[in-house]
Image: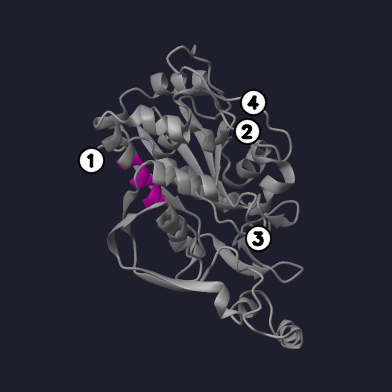
Amino acid sequence: MAIFTIGFLVVYYGLKSSKAKADIAKNQVISPEETSYQDASPIPLKTESSKKGTYNILFLGYGGATHEGSMLTDSIIVIHIDTNIKKISLISIPRDLWVTGGRKINAEGSSLGFGNIGSTIKNVIALPINYYVAVDFGGFVKMIDSLGGISVQVPTTFTDSFYPKAGEENNTCGKSQTEISTLKAKYSGYELETQFTCRYEQIHYDKGPANLDGAAALKFVRSRHGDSDFARSLRQFAVLIGIENKLISTQGAGKLDSVINTIFKLVKTDLNAGIIKTLIQTLGDAKAYNVKQIQITTSNLLNEGKSGDGAYILVPKAGNFDFSEIQTFIKTNLE
């Protein structure tokens, strides 16, 4: 099957009938305003790139107001579009990567604002970020439900016995304050969390096809304790492909505009309708593009470690804050 630029589709359905207000102040994200895509005039694209005809869109998934660490990014994917060789590369950046400034890369959004983290991403993978798109967990659920659910290919079988139940984060599970204090003195992090089993539910997926509504899709991409963060990035890729396939079928059924009108307000971005129109023209024949997935993992470029306060982090095998091997790896895989 011919595959369209997956990340661009995520942007496109959110903006085809909209015009964004550009506001990238710290910790301030914006939703597009509804207007006519057809009436928009093409706007020149940002051209900060070492290679003509290439563009990089940063896709971010974050918790949102109802979640602890509301601005922390759970998903960080750079969508690299190369119009010269008709190739889309999806580059997954692990959220626990330790970056300059002494924090995990998933905290850059809350520290700098989503529109301002491009410099951090560039420092890691040596690719300039032209535009960003962000959606929170609540928006993600509504997005999938507005499409009528999606079908995905589960990469590997997994069971997560400690997926957090919404609203149960502070449930004491019948334990007294004395018992809780004893547990906190003995355990920390994930080991402490597992002492409060009532806060969690078990989810399970078998390898192969699965149909997901919004709530199930969120669990599918967020689950952390059934395999690994790197396996989770493969699940995130699977969901993006599922969204793409559903958008194609929705368009074929003549329902795309009504779906777009329902979900366009969910996207936070610095794109606008004019830029989207130019992107469409620049990309040309969508069916000509191939898609490649690129992962940065402990199997190739990273080591596990601990921060000064004991938090789990990932650091380059080349050395702390030395991203040269990562940059070479990315460059090689983009060719």
Q: Secondary structure at mark 2?
A: loop
Task: Spot the residue most to the front.
Answer: 174
Q: Is residue 267 left or right of residue 69?
A: left
Of the two numbered discs 3 and 1 in the rendering, the one whose residue sits closer to the viewer: 1
Q: CA distance from mark 2 to mark 3?
A: 37 Å
Assess whether mark 4 and mark 2 are in contact (beta carbons under 8 angstroms).
Answer: yes
Q: Is residue 142 left or right of residue 241?
A: right
Q: CA distance from mark 3 to mark 1?
A: 41 Å
What amino acid is found at the position of numbered circle 3 in the picture? Gly
Which comes sooner in the sequence, label 1 or label 2?
A: 1
Q: Which residue corresponds to mark 2?
A: 30
Residue at the image position 33 percent from the left and 37 percent from the top: 247
Q: Is residue 35 magenta?
A: no
Which comes sooner in the sequence, label 3 or label 1?
A: 1
In the image, the segment drawn in magenta is 237-245
What amino acid is found at the position of numbered circle 4 in the picture? Ala
Q: Residue 5 placed where, x, y %?
A: 38, 35
Which comes sooner in the sequence, label 1 or label 4?
A: 1
Q: Is residue 254 left or right of residue 74?
A: left
Q: CA distance from mark 2 to mark 4?
A: 8 Å
The numbered mark at residue 22 is 4
Which comes sooner in the sequence, label 2 or label 4?
A: 4
The numbered mark at residue 319 is 3
